[in-house]
Image: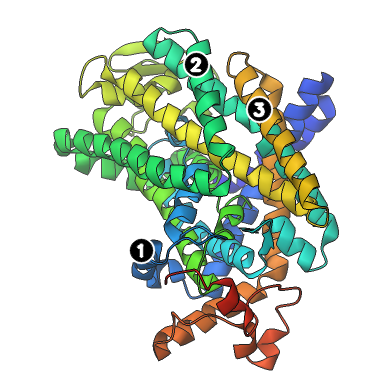
Amino acid sequence: MGVIQIFIDQTIDAFKGMTTFQGFDGFCNALASLLWSPPLVILLVCTGIYFSIRMAFPQVRKIKKMVTLLFGGSSSEKGVSSFQAFAMAVAGRVGTGNIVGVATAIAYGGPGAVFWMWMIAFLGSGSAFVEATLAQIYKDEIDGEYRGSPALYFGKRGLGGLKIVFIVACIVGCGIALPGIQSNAIATAIHENFGVSSYIPMIITVVLLALIIIGGTKSIAKAAEVIVPFMSGIYILAAIIIIIVNIGELPRVLGDIFGGALGLKQALAGTLGWAILWGVKRGVFSNEAGQGTAPHVAAAAEVSHPAKQGLVQAFSVYFDTLFVCSATAFAILMTGTYQVFKTSEGADANGIFQTYADHTSTIFANVNGKDFTGSAESISMFTPQAFNTLIHGFGGKFVAISLFFFAFTTLMALYYYAESDLLILLEKKTAATRKAATWILKIIYLFVTGFFAIQSNAVAWAVADIGVACMAWINVIGILIIAAPAIICFKDYERREKAGTEDEFFTIDSLSEEEQKAFKGVTFWHTGDAKKVHAQAKE
């Protein structure tokens, strides 16, 4: 079945679901499926392609500059360093999806799905640049700290309706629904792999989280710049060891990935469409490019030019998918812990594995010689069993610990997103009102984190999906409308690179009169303002 037909069928099914649901749970699940249906995936992919072409593929031309800027600059009283903003963005991007999500993509789409995850990261980095640069351009100083969000750049461009809907979606999705999901994943993984009560990881998670978020933006940034490199480094290192131990399998794995993504046999057999669908979907969900989450942390960075943070955030998309997701994918494929067949006979006459998406009967999964019935159980075993090949009994515990760090840093990022939009909503209120509101948000956030860590709530998944999907729809459509300032900033930065003045403070007044017209509603970046705003930065 071709990918176009698959997308059409899934879209039709999503619309049908809105007419057949039963009860509130059914409504939430049906609406979430509709919002996350193929049209959103197509929109995100096309947006990435459009911005990549508009800027002549900076994700290729500027890769070296991305890494250089990552370690440039420093924090100030009002802003965080570029690396801290990068770490906070990665904290939000890298989560349970990098472990379970990749396994799901392989189970449903075969090894070829990995290639399409790479492709969507490549294209999505263009969208990530634009949204992050817009966040820098339109940022505000609230209570002595830089704050930004898609809600802010929409509001300043006169799109007040989009601003309010985005704020509500972010606070409900990131501030109320998602925290419990992340903490429940932590508690469940630790309980199942270490045999301790779920209350223990719940208490540890809530206490540590409280200590960090009560400390404010700087506390979150400092925690992220320590935890993110550590957790990602250990996880990637373990995957590299697996690759080295199984180096003889590398040609086969690469053949499976590229053959499954581009092979004629797969196209004729109908499995190519599923590889594209699931690779794109999981890639989009994991790297979050264009979905409106990363702009919150991008705006907090202390930089001399908006495009600098745009390039740094574009690299964070690469890091999430090309490094962390690939670590999971290669661990699974190199060790052979992935095998999903339509029947126990295995591959068909053409040597093509039948993926879960083709199934009309019960799935048969072979994980290190052990059979599992049911997609959830078999897929959840892929990654632990892959790492289990290093040391027997090591896989489940290692993945549980990794999941703790991944989900915990996501909890930090989610709170920051919700708090930023709450402050933007109350920007014109008194400082005392904003302070009281953030304390209420902290209490609610910690409560749902603890409560749902030990009590599964299926509705929370759907509500969270609805909130994040609304953010994605609003943001990607919005940045297509108001992208001009970001494109102009990129061109200005390239001009400065050629002139050797890239480290001088950017000012709107230095642009041509025609270019300045695109910067309606900008608070910073005027002559005199930039130097004052960035006086404490050490570029």
Q: Position of residue 87 (x, y in %)?
A: 45, 49
Q: Is residue 344 above or below residue 358?
A: above
Going 53% across and 11% down the picture, which residue do you hit?
Answer: 199
**Which amino acid type is shown beneath numbered disc 1?**
Val
The circle on residue 67 is 1
Q: Position of residue 21 (x, y in %)?
A: 80, 24
Going 71% across and 23% down the picture, which residue do you hit?
Answer: 459
Rounded to the nearest angstrom, the CA distance separating label 1 from label 2 is 36 Å
Q: Is residue 290 above or below residue 485?
A: above
Quarter of the image for residue 401 reads top left
Residue on which the image places disc 3: 461
Quarter of the image for residue 461 reads top right
For the residue pair 397 and 216, the one nearer the viewer reads as 216
* Disc 1 + disc 2, Cβ < 8 Å: no
Query: Under tag 1, what secondary structure?
Result: helix
Residue on which the image places disc 2: 188
**Which amino acid type is shown beneath numbered disc 2?**
Thr
